[in-house]
Image (spheres, rainbow, N blue to C red):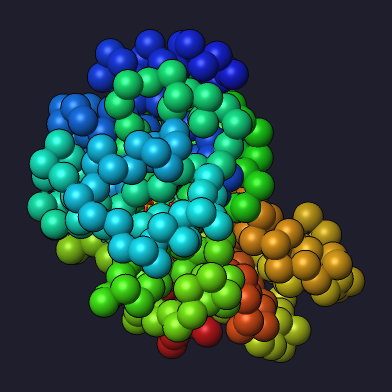
């Protein structure tokens, strides 16, 4: 199993030696390696069982470093950086030669951000290389928002988890590219399109592509059984149909009396979207660990962060065939 601790020097030594370390960010835990070391980066793909056509995000310690790795920064990107970095905004920008092809899956753009977590910022500022870091979960599984989630899923494959506590945002960064100086959201995330619009004017939201392995066989068998998840506006109806004995429920803010209370995860008792986002993955991890027959999740209002949360829940439900409802 991985050691868990707050020792930044230990993390620095491991990373400098080409090893992997799980690092906290404000969004989710990342599985980090030296982004300029292709061998270390290849190990990320191996540990996650992630296909190499899926590129990685590069993390830097301050905005000033951006120009070391990207060839051009459009003026609108400068404005977004000013407003949102450090923070959960990842920008797609034309890469320089020094970013290895394995990072971008040979694409001409690199995804790059300054994360907003005190431990990881300190670590990045001590390193003389940037960190490549996807979410620290096996490919296509629930992202980790606590050290325990990382330990449980990939702990035996990595030496160290830097413990930064629970992730404040709880959903991944928003990924933004540019078409003729207009921002295009390629992944909904912790910063909403509306918030980007306030800084940048018109924003497009790209149709989501999702997380699809080439074939089910690419996923290792022991990860495979996962509780089927249903996303619905009518939680009570589905609960009545299936019964409460082996059913987990995720609601936005509603309490529900007619089921064992440990089967229930209320994302935010005060109906606060930000709190709901930060509790989302932990609730999924918790209920998924209970060996229930199914999880029924309530759709949130499709506004602001609700849109990001619904999109993640829809993907979590992706494995559950509609006919089994
Ligand atoms: O919040 C986050 O972004 C977290 C933390 C650790 O920073 N990271 C994260 O990484 O979510 P990952 O690998 O789980 O998701 C990154 C997404 C993938 O869907 C990938 O396809 C896309 O970013 N991506 C990365 N580089 C890209 C590129 N050059 N062009 C297009 N998409 C890219
Ligand atoms: Mg991920």
Is 224 situated left or right of 307 in this image? Answer: left
Q: Quadrant of residue 153?
A: top left
> Where ligand 1 lies, by quadrant?
bottom left
Query: Which residue is at the front of the view, 47 or 53?
Result: 53
List x then y, in percent, for residue 106.
10, 52
Task: Give the answer, above or below, for where 27 lies relative to 233.
Answer: above
Is 107 situated left or right of 285 in this image? Answer: left
Q: Residue at x 35, y 37 (%)?
A: 65
Residue 223 visible from this viewpoint: no
Q: Quadrant of residue 320?
A: bottom left
List x then y, in percent, for residue 77.
39, 61
Q: Given the current orientation, which residue lies at the most extreme front position?
A: 75
Query: Which residue is at the front of the view, 62 or 3?
Result: 62
Q: Quadrant of residue 46?
A: top left
Query: Which residue is at the front of the view, 246 or 248?
Result: 248
Q: Residue at x 31, y 16 (%)?
A: 16
């Amino acid at each position: 199993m991985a050691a868990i601790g707050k020792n930044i020097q230990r993390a620095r030594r491991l990373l400098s030696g080409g090893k992997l370390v799980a690092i906290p960010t404000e969004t989710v835990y990342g599985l980090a390696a030296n982004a300029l070391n292709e061998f270390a980066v290849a190990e990320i793909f191996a540990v996650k069982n992630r296909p190499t056509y899926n590129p990685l995000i590069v993390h830097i310690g301050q905005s000033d470093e951006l120009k070391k790795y990207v060839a051009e920064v459009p003026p609108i990107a400068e404005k977004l950086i000013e407003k949102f970095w450090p923070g959960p905004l990842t920008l797609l920008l034309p890469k320089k030669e020094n970013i290895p092809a394995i990072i971008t899956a040979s694409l001409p753009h690199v995804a790059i951000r300054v994360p907003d977590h005190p431990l990881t910022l300190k670590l990045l500022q001590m390193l003389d290389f940037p960190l490549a870091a996807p979410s620290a979960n096996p490919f296509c599984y629930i992202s980790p928002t606590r050290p325990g989630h990382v330990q449980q899923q990939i702990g035996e494959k990595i030496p160290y988890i830097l413990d930064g506590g629970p992730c404040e945002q709880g959903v991944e960064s928003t990924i933004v590219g540019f078409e003729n100086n207009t921002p295009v959201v390629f992944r909904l995330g912790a910063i909403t399109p509306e918030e980007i619009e306030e800084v940048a004017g018109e924003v497009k939201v790209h149709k989501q592509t999702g997380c699809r392995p080439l074939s089910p066989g690419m996923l290792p068998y022991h990860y495979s059984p996962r509780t089927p998840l249903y996303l619905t506006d009518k939680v009570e109806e589905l609960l009545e149909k299936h019964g409460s004995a082996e059913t987990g429920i995720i609601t936005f803010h509603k309490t529900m009396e007619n089921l064992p209370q440990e089967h229930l995860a209320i994302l935010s008792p005060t109906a606060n979207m930000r709190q709901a986002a930060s509790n989302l993955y932990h609730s999924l991890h918790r209920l998924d660990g209970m060996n229930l027959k199914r999880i029924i999740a309530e759709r949130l209002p499709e506004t602001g962060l609700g849109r990001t949360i619904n999109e993640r829940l829809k993907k979590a439900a992706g494995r559950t065939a509609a006919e089994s409802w």
